[in-house]
C-alpha cells in the first residue's frame, strides 16, 4: 500500500532490518527509489554489486526542487535511523553511524559541492528526545520529521510552547509537546521538529516559511485526524478490494475459545511471566513433541516478549485475535546448545536497557534476582527432563546438551542473543510458522485456561519467607514494527 502514498521521501526504521538483507532489498525494490539513508553504511555487504545497489536504492541524500517567487529553490532531504538498530542484527552488513556526525558531514559536503542547496530537511527514526539533541547540534538543519518513539505533538494557536488538545480528546494524555517543537541553535537559527503519533491515526501537516536566506521564519500547521468518513483513494481501494473480502472472512473465523483473559499487555509479558506467553511457548513445545522427531536431549521453548503484541479478552477466539497478538510470522528452529549457553541466553534477557527481550518460557523453571548486577541475576534454572521415567525438573547442567525451540528471529542472534548463533552446536530449521503453531494448539485444546504456574520467579527485594515479586521494570513503547518516517513538505518563500 505504500506505493499508493504520494511520499516524496522515506527513511528506514529499525523494523526494516529484522528480516536481514534478504528482507530489506525486495522491500526497497517494491517501494521504489525514494528512501534516504544518511547515517547507514552498507560497506559490510560482501557482494559489491549488492552493496552498490543498496546505495542507489537508499543514498545519503536526495534533492528536490520547486519554483518560488525568486526562482528555483532546492531542498536536500536527509534520513537517519537509530544506531540502536545495530543491536537487532547479528550479521553486521550495515553500520549505523552517529546521527549528528553523519548529518553534519553530509550537509557540509553538499553545501561545498552545491552552494545553491540551502534548505535541509531530515527524516528521522531515532525518537523525539534524540531529535531534539540533533536539532540543537547539527548546523544548517531546518526541519526534522521524526519517528520511532511514536510521540504525539499537537499545535496550540494560543501558546506555541504548550501542546494543544488533539482532535481525539482521548489522546490528550499522550500529547507530549507542541507541534512543531521549536529548537533554537546556539547560532540563533530555528529548527522545527514534527512527529505525529503512530498507526497512521493522524496526518501531520507542516507548512514552513523561509526568508530570502532560506532560513525558517514562520510556520503554520493543521494536523488531520484520519477517520472512516474521509473519501477513499480510488486506486488504493481497487488494490485493497482484491484481498479485503477473503481476509475479512478468514479473520472472522472462530478457531477456539478461552475461559480467561489472555494477558499480553506492555506491562506484563515484557517483564514477568504472563499467561499468553505461557500459552505460546507451551504451543511451541507441544508442536515439536507432537509433530517433530523425538529429541535425544531435554527440550524447552522460549519466545522473546517483544513478539507478543496484545492480550485477548475471554470468550470466542477469532483468527483476528491471534494475528493481532502475534503479528510477525516467523519459522521455528530447534537449537542444540550446552547448558552454559542457555544460562547466558537467560541472563541476557534480563538486560533492563533493552525492550522486548525478556523471554517467556516453557519446559523450564527459572528464578531471577534483579537486585544483582547484570550477569549475576540468574539464580537457578531447572529444565524438564524428557527422558526420565517420570517427568521432573532437573537443575541446568552447564556441560549438558539441550534442545531449545525458538523462532528464527532469536536463533540467528537478533536482539543481542549472539550467544545462540556463536555457541550453538547445531540448528534444525523447520518450516513451521509461528501463527500456524498457535492456531493448531488453540483448535486442539480449546477452551483454553492458561494460568501463571510460577515458571518464572523474579526477586526485587531481599527474599522474606521465600516470597518474591514479579516485576523488575516498566516496558518502554516499542516500535514493532516501527515504521519508516515520512514527510510531505510544503514551503513558502518570502521576498
Image (spheres, rainbow, N blue to C red):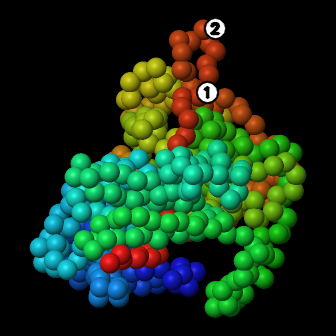
Foreground: 135 or 453? Answer: 135
Q: Which residue is mark 2?
A: 465
Which label's residue is closer to the chain start, 1 or 2?
A: 2
| In this rendering, position of residue 157 left or right of residue 311 | left
Which quadrant: the N terminus? Answer: bottom right
Quick one: which residue is furthest to the front in this view? 495
Q: Position of residue 184 (x, y in %)?
A: 32, 51
Neighbours of disc 2 within 10 Å: few (<14), some (14-19), many (20+): few
Foreground: 88 or 80? Answer: 80
Dot 2: what SS? Answer: loop
Quadrant of the image occupied by residue 22: bottom left
- Residue positioned 74% across, 56% down in the render: 441
- Residue positioned 69% across, 63% down in the render: 323
Mark linked to residue 152: none
Dot 1: what SS? Answer: loop
Q: Position of residue 111 (x, y in %)?
A: 16, 72
Mark pair 1, 2: CA separation: 15 Å
Q: Is residue 28 visible?
A: no
Quadrant of the image occupied by residue 203: bottom right
Q: Which residue is mark 1?
A: 470
Neighbours of disc 1 within 10 Å: few (<14), some (14-19), many (20+): some
Amino acid at each position: 500500500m505504500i506505493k499508493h502514498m504520494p511520499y516524496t521521501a522515506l527513511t528506514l526504521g529499525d523494523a526494516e532490518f529484522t528480516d536481514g538483507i534478504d528482507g530489506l532489498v525486495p522491500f526497497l525494490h517494491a517501494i521504489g527509489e525514494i528512501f534516504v539513508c544518511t547515517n547507514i553504511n552498507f560497506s559490510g555487504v560482501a557482494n559489491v554489486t549488492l552493496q552498490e545497489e543498496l546505495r542507489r536504492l537508499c543514498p545519503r541524500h536526495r534533492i528536490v526542487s520547486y519554483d518560488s517567487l525568486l526562482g528555483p529553490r532546492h531542498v536536500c532531504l536527509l534520513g537517519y535511523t537509530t544506531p540502536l538498530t545495530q543491536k537487532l542484527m547479528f550479521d553486521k552488513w550495515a553500520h549505523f553511524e552517529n546521527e549528528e556526525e553523519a548529518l553534519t558531514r553530509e550537509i557540509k559536503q553538499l553545501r561545498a559541492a552545491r552552494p545553491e542547496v540551502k534548505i535541509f530537511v531530515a527524516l528521522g527514526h531515532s525518537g523525539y528526545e534524540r531529535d531534539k539533541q540533533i536539532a540543537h547540534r547539527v548546523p544548517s538543519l531546518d526541519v526534522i520529521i521524526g519517528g520511532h518513539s511514536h510521540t504525539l505533538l499537537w499545535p496550540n494557536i494560543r501558546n506555541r510552547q504548550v501542546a494543544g488538545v488533539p482532535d481525539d480528546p482521548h489522546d490528550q494524555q499522550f500529547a507530549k509537546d507542541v507541534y512543531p517543537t521549536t529548537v533554537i541553535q546556539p547560532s540563533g537559527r530555528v529548527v522545527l521538529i514534527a512527529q505525529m503519533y503512530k498507526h497512521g491515526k493522524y496526518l501531520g501537516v507542516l507548512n514552513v516559511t523561509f526568508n530570502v536566506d532560506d532560513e525558517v521564519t514562520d510556520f503554520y500547521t493543521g494536523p488531520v485526524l484520519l477517520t472512516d468518513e474521509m473519501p477513499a483513494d480510488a486506486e488504493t481501494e481497487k488494490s485493497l478490494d482484491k484481498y479485503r473480502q477473503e481476509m475479512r472472512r478468514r479473520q472472522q473465523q472462530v478457531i477456539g475459545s478461552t475461559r480467561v483473559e489472555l494477558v499480553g499487555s506492555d506491562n506484563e509479558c515484557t517483564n514477568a511471566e504472563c499467561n499468553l506467553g505461557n500459552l505460546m511457548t507451551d504451543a511451541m513445545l507441544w508442536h515439536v513433541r507432537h509433530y517433530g522427531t523425538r529429541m535425544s536431549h531435554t527440550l524447552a521453548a522460549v519466545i522473546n516478549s517483544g513478539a507478543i503484541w496484545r492480550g485477548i479478552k475471554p470468550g470466542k477466539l477469532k483468527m483476528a485475535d491471534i494475528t493481532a497478538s502475534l503479528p510477525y510470522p516467523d519459522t521455528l528452529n530447534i537449537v542444540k546448545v550446552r547448558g552454559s549457553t542457555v544460562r547466558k541466553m537467560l541472563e541476557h534477557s534480563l538486560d533492563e536497557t533493552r525492550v522486548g527481550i525478556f523471554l517467556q518460557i516453557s519446559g523450564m523453571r527459572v528464578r531471577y534476582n534483579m537486585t544483582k548486577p547484570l550477569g549475576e541475576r540468574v539464580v537457578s534454572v531447572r529444565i524438564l527432563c524428557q527422558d526420565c521415567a517420570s517427568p521432573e525438573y532437573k537443575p541446568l547442567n552447564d556441560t549438558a546438551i539441550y534442545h531449545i525451540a525458538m523462532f528464527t528471529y532469536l536463533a540467528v542472534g537478533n536482539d543481542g542473543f549472539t550467544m545462540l548463533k556463536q555457541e550453538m552446536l547445531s540448528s534444525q530449521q523447520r518450516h513451521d510458522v509461528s501463527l500456524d503453531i498457535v492456531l493448531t494448539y488453540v483448535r486442539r485444546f480449546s477452551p483454553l485456561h492458561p494460568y501463571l504456574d510460577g515458571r518464572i520467579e523474579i526477586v526485587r527485594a531481599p527474599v522474606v519467607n521465600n516470597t518474591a515479586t514479579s516485576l523488575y521494570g516498566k516496558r518502554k513503547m516499542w516500535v514493532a514494527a516501527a515504521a519508516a518516517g515520512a514527510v510531505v513538505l510544503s514551503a513558502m518563500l518570502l521576498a
